Amino acid sequence: MRQIILDTETTGLDPNQGHRIIEFAGLEMINRKLTGKHLHLYIHPDRDIDPDAERVHGISLESLQGKPRFHEVAGQIADFLRDAELIIHNAPFDVGFLNAEFDRVDLPRIKALCAEVTDTLVMARDQFPGKRNSLDALCDRFEIDRSNRTLHGALIDCELLSEVYLWMTRGQESLVMDIDVETPAASAGDMQFERKPLIVRRASEEEMAAHEGYLGDLDKAVKGACLWRTLENPPAEGQA
């Protein structure tokens, strides 16, 4: 299925209070690969931008002078999203704004326009309950480089989210998900999988000393050698 990694930036938090979309970004993904096709737009909101929102995304009203209004690009956005699965982090936020904008220009809402919506925040909470699951936190967890991201921007957030989504869904795909779809003739025996070397972390001297002290306490408790000692130094063959 065609998927769109999607993000927006807005003038504030609530479309029901008249807040508007000021940046839209979508990256197309097919067969778990970004195709290079994308849609990225800055949009004049015809209203002020809340200072708190501007501090997050860094987009000022002055920087949007001369940019199109939403009604001028609404059809372009709808056509780009049509029939796709949307991949969004905290989907209710972006979907709520898109629905409000589409309502203003009498276009179908997201539920009617798109095949489905996948919320990566919900996925992350299921996979990592009780942990921080912001986009930044997930990038750190999966060791995804976000050094180029100083402010929240829709396009860079989509690029990061595409990597996060692929990490979170690796177990849902076949073992050959990363094989180029243009080489179907290769047999299973010909396939080469690159496997990263395992990282071995050895205990420090302090940790070894603490471990030895703990075993000593166990020896005292059982008045002899604890079970771990016998596992570390099993008796020679023929000995009891």
Image: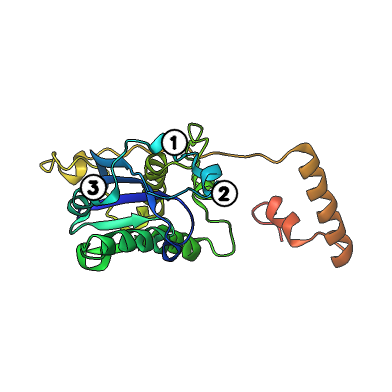
Q: Quadrant of the C terminus?
A: bottom right
Q: Please tell me which residue is depicted at 77% across the width and 44% down the height of the picture.
A: 207
Q: Quadrant of residue 62?
A: top left
Q: Between 111 and 52, which is closer to the camera in this rendering? A: 52
Judge whether 125 appears above or below 205 on screen: below
- The residue under label 3 is 73
Residue at the left extreme? 185
Q: Please tell me which residue is depicted at 25% across the width and 46% down the height of the picture.
A: 29
C-alpha span from label 1 to label 2: 16 Å
Q: Tell which circle, 2 or 3, labels the residue nearer the N-terminal end.
A: 2
C-alpha span from label 1 to label 3: 20 Å
Q: Tell which circle, 1 or 2, labels the residue nearer the N-terminal end.
A: 2
Identify the element where label 2 is drawn.
helix
- The residue under label 1 is 62
Residue 195: percent from left, percent from top = 39, 39
Estimate how packed mark 1 is, as few (under 14), some (14 to 19) or many (20 or more) residues with alpha carbons within 10 Å: few
- The residue under label 2 is 52
Residue at the top extreme? 148
Estimate how packed mark 3 is, as few (under 14), some (14 to 19) or many (20 or more) residues with alpha carbons within 10 Å: few
What amino acid is at disc 1?
Glu
Residue 132 visible here: yes
What amino acid is at disc 2?
Asp
Q: Are marks 1 and 3 in contact (CB under 8 Å)?
A: no
C-alpha span from label 2 to label 3: 26 Å
Residue 130: percent from left, percent from top = 59, 64
